[in-house]
Image (cartoon, rainbow, N blue to C red):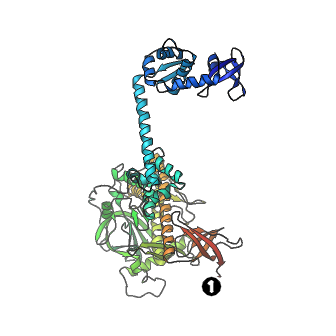
Amino acid sequence: MGKQIFYEESGQFKVAEVVQENDATFLVNTAHGKRAKIKASHVFLVFDGDASQFLQQAADAAAGIDISLLWEAVGGEAEFTAASAATEYFGGNSGNVELAAILMALYAAPIYFYKKNKGVFKAAPEEALKLALAAIERRKQQEAQINSWIQELLAGSLPAAIAADAKVILHAPDKQSLSYKAVIKAAEQKKTSLFTLLQSVGAVPPLPEYFLDGFLLTQFPKGAGCGDYPVPVINNLPVADTEIRAFSIDDIETSEVDDAFSVRNLPNGNKLVGIHIAAPALAITAESPLEKLIFERLSTVYYPGGKITMLPDNWIAAFSLDEGAARPAVSLYAEVNPQFEIVHCESRIESVYVDCNLRIENIEQAFQPQQMRSNAEVFAHQHEMNWLYDFAVARMQARGKYDPERLPQYDYGIKLEADNKVRISVRERGAPIDTLVSELMIFANSTWAQMLDEAGMAGLFRVQPAGRVRMSTQSEPHVGLGLKHYAWFTSPLRRATDYINQKQLISLLDETALPRFKPQEAMLFAILRDFESAYTAYNDFQRHMEAYWSLIYIQQERLQELTARLIRDDLVRIEGLPLVSRVSGVPIDVIPKCQMKVAITGIDLEQVSVGLNYVNVLMPVAGV
């Protein structure tokens, strides 16, 4: 039997029969009968005898080596060779087998011995070794804990630690956490999804709560509560004329009353229209804790059955234009002649008495300004609203946006009632009340946006010179509205953009007030970016929850077919519900905006999706 070599390859020790050798390489026959070249730098021993027997003897000897004892034997600052380590451990009678065993043991214990060169090592310092051993022990304990949790999950039990982490595991998992590793491994073993596994052990709450948990974790990681922010007293505000009795128009659930209106007859036959906007910016100082909260939250979040306000409740109570008291406001007054032409505009900071908060649900049926008008009022301020409606239509015509023939659009209200029923109400968008309110808001927003721009003042503008609407720190035309200037000012209790713009506007109206932002200020750009991102996420969540409750409504009413209107391709908007979905089988020749009947093939509440099949196109009713 010829010469054999003992060598290392990819961290494993092997033996082979030498065929030919030179200074740099060995040509060998491996244990598997293949011819190979082995670098001399990888070879530790050349020996005679049975190669496989040698390797087995070395492995058996290595298995019996006490690593701690070996570390003590070679410990110290100096480097050592494998040969000297073999002599220290086995004594002076050590041979090739013992040397090979020591090499195997040294390579197998990298936390005890650092490899410095071929066959040269250094013992790990005592402190470093202690830390490494502690880490190994910790990993063993962690693996044991993971395995224990896996067994509980597979048995249908929910470990307390995983129950505590369930929200994070479901929505924003730390993939290095022990709880996540246990759940994902258990799901793999059970051949199911993480969600289904946690649902089976009771770790998933009812779906509305589950969806809300995910939204809050990503958008409100510090929690939905606002905390305590004292409200300062605002003194010495100018008081509006005593003849002005403002009134607001909102739906019945509105608690943040941002805007109110007034109409006053002038001696010259004209009317003075007042648009009064809540003014929290008067009391909020730059870089204050409350302003930081505003820039964190950026907007109020709305969803069926709840909302998360931008401002704390006590600030809303202090500045909401609630009836029966004088409230701080930024007011826009416009003198309007009988032809609904604006003669003069003026803006003021003042205290305005709010006479009443009108609720749309209570007055809409009685508010029919397009019909014959009576001298008697069914509700307070009806005559003023009738005139404001005419003014609003004139404003819309002036913008070139009045289109009485446009296709109807709808707004939906979703109420979750005590009997677990979902109630969905439908209102046509562009109803007289909507026209009145929206046109007055557009008028105020465009007027004040023009004031900021002409003063060279920084602001957050809504622009649409072409294409889609976007936010900008520079005023540009808004072609969709038919305006040269537009920005949001009229919801400062609900949106950070409106707060910022109101702060800038106040600096124009009050010579003692400084602008909050200078043009091209970096922080303003950052807030614009953050606002657009948050506002999109908030609206997406609202649409998601509206779609979910629409599916619950479909199940509740046991609907089998729906009427839909084609948007494009196979995308449709379901009529009577705030729901958009795709439909299978839509013929290629069906034109957009047409009505069709669709059949429901299935509902997946977890994915908030509905399966729909095309049935047929609905023919338009004659005369409609």
Identify the image quadrant of the C terminus: bottom right
Please tell me whether residue 371 is drawn above or below residue 166 in the rendered image: below
Residue at point 27% right, 56% down? 232
Which residue corresponds to the image point at 60% horizontal and 71% vertical from the top-left?
612
Residue at image coords 41%, 51%: 162
Q: Is 159 left, or right, of 569 in this rendering? A: left
Residue 345: x %, y % from top left: 43, 67
**Location of residue 538 in the rendering, given as x and y in whole percent from the top left corner:** 47, 60
- Above or below: residue 526 compared with residue 254: above
**For residue 11, which quarter of the picture?**
top right
Q: Is residue 545 or residue 186 the one in the foreground?
A: 186
Residue most extreme to the top:
92
Residue 350 horizontal side relative to residue 120, left or right: left
Q: Secondary structure at mark 1?
A: loop
Give the image location of residue 461, x and y in percent. Answer: 49, 57
**Does residue 169 sit above or below 339 in this rendering?**
above
Identify the image quadrant of the N terminus. Answer: top right
The vertical placement of 99 against 265, above or below, is: above
